[in-house]
Amino acid sequence: MVEETIKSIRETENKADQIVKEAEQESKRILKTAKEEAKQAADKLIDEAKSDALKTANQAKKDGEVMLAQAAEETRREAEQMKKAALERKKEAAALVLERLT
């Protein structure tokens, strides 16, 4: 009977050792999976941030181009007005000179 008890204790110890080994393996597997998932999530966030930054930069470039075109058009209009005003003054000056000469 003592032998049976000792045998039962050894079997129980062996089972306990096996359970501990399996738990350690499962723990390592879970940790490895968690690390891989964390890396994938971080990579995804980085990719999304890069994509968002690129979209923002592209939009800023487009906005800048629109503003530049608007400023160029405004400058062109102002130059045209100045040219017309100068031409009118030239005509007025010529008329004044002719008037004084006669």
Image: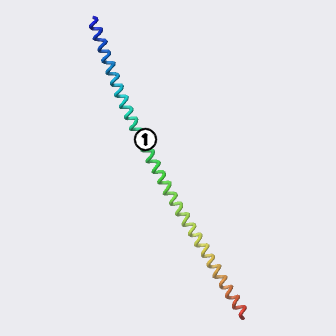
Residue depicted at 32% across the width and 20% down the height? 17
Which quadrant of the view contains residue 28?
top left
Q: To which quarter of the image does residue 87 belong?
A: bottom right
- For label 1, count other residues whose C-alpha is less than 10 Å away and answer few (under 14), some (14-19) or many (20+): few
Q: Is residue 46 left or right of residue 6?
A: right
Q: Which of the image's four quarters has the N terminus?
A: top left
Q: Is residue 21 above or below residue 9?
A: below
Q: Is residue 88 left or right of residue 24?
A: right
Please state which of residues 84 and 33 is positioned toward the viewer in this rendering. 33
The residue shown at (42%, 38%) is 38
Q: Residue 100's spot in the image, x, y percent?
A: 72, 91
- Counting labels gives 1
x, y percent for residue 18: 31, 21
Q: Is residue 33 above or below residue 45?
A: above
Tell me which corner region of the image, top left, top right, bottom left or bottom right, holds residue 12: top left
Left/right of residue 1 with respect to residue 47 in the rendered view: left
Q: Residue 32, how many percent across, how many down? A: 37, 34
